[in-house]
Image (cartoon, rainbow, N blue to C red):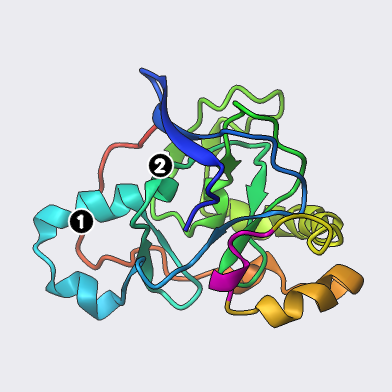
Amino acid sequence: MLHPKTRLAWISDEVGYGVLATEDIPRGTILWALDPLDRVLSPADVKRLDPALWPILETYTYVTGRGDRILCWDHGRFMNHSCEPVSLSPGVDFELAVRDIRAGEEITCDYGSLNLEHDLNCLCGSPICRGVIRASDFEALAPSWDARLQAAVVHATEVSQPLLPFVKDAEQLARWAAHPAELPSALRHRYPIRDVIAGAPRLNDRIA
């Protein structure tokens, strides 16, 4: 489930839809949490699907550290990539705002953390844009993601958390806020096998 102070919006012809904040959202806020309505597809589930559905899965799902695919039921599946993301996930099933987000600002994540099967061309426009988002970015960038997450989680108990009821590790949030070094690393989400959909055709690179 995505934070309620968000809406779906058309960003550009190049990027398509994205997610905007409708009000200011402070650093340390849980922006997304896995909830019971999200579809969790195991590798066996995926193999049972008609291959015609695989391109849809590649576009709108991400792969967890367990190798499952998550298809968000709400507009969380339209969150775009940025090389300077405002939303990152520690090694648990939620994402945090790693800086203050202003009303009207796009909420972005880093696709390098989603266990990509193919490289993606990037048009995020950031001064530090990587140009191409690669599966290998996960290990290279995880230390910097962890540092940003630890700096953000210390504020988690100071801000409103409407998604807290959906967080499986909710009882741990106060401890992580007090002891940020104990926050699980984003590397927990790393899944080592790139071709999760066995035999899936290689599609043209998508624009991130």
The residue shown at (57%, 40%) is 108
Seen in the image, is 70 located left or right of residue 170? left
Q: Residues within 10 Å of mark 2 (few under 14, many from 20)?
A: some
Q: Can residue 208 be seen?
A: no
Instruction: Verify whether residue 88 appears in magenta.
Output: no
Identify which amino acid the numbered label 1 is placed on.
Answer: Trp
Identify which amino acid the numbered label 2 is placed on.
Answer: Phe
Estimate the x, y position of residue 90 in percent, counting from the top left: 67, 65
The relative height of residue 167 versus residue 208 in the rendered view (above or below) is: below
On the image, which quarter does residue 36 sit in? bottom left
The residue shown at (72%, 74%) is 184
| Residue that badge 1 annotates | 54
- Pick out the residue farthest to the right: 178
| SS at badge 1 | helix
Tell me how far mark 2 sits from mark 1, CA to CA. 17 Å
Estimate the x, y position of residue 85 in percent, counting from the top left: 65, 41
Between 125 and 140, the one nearer to me in the picture: 125
Estimate the x, y position of residue 156 in percent, counting from the top left: 78, 61
Q: Report the span colored magenta.
A: 161-167
Q: Earlier in the sequence, mark 2 or mark 1?
A: 1
Instruction: Verify whether residue 163 appears in magenta.
Output: yes
The residue shown at (67%, 42%) is 86
Q: Give the label, 2 or 1, closer to the camera.
A: 2
| Residue that badge 2 annotates | 78
| SS at badge 2 | helix
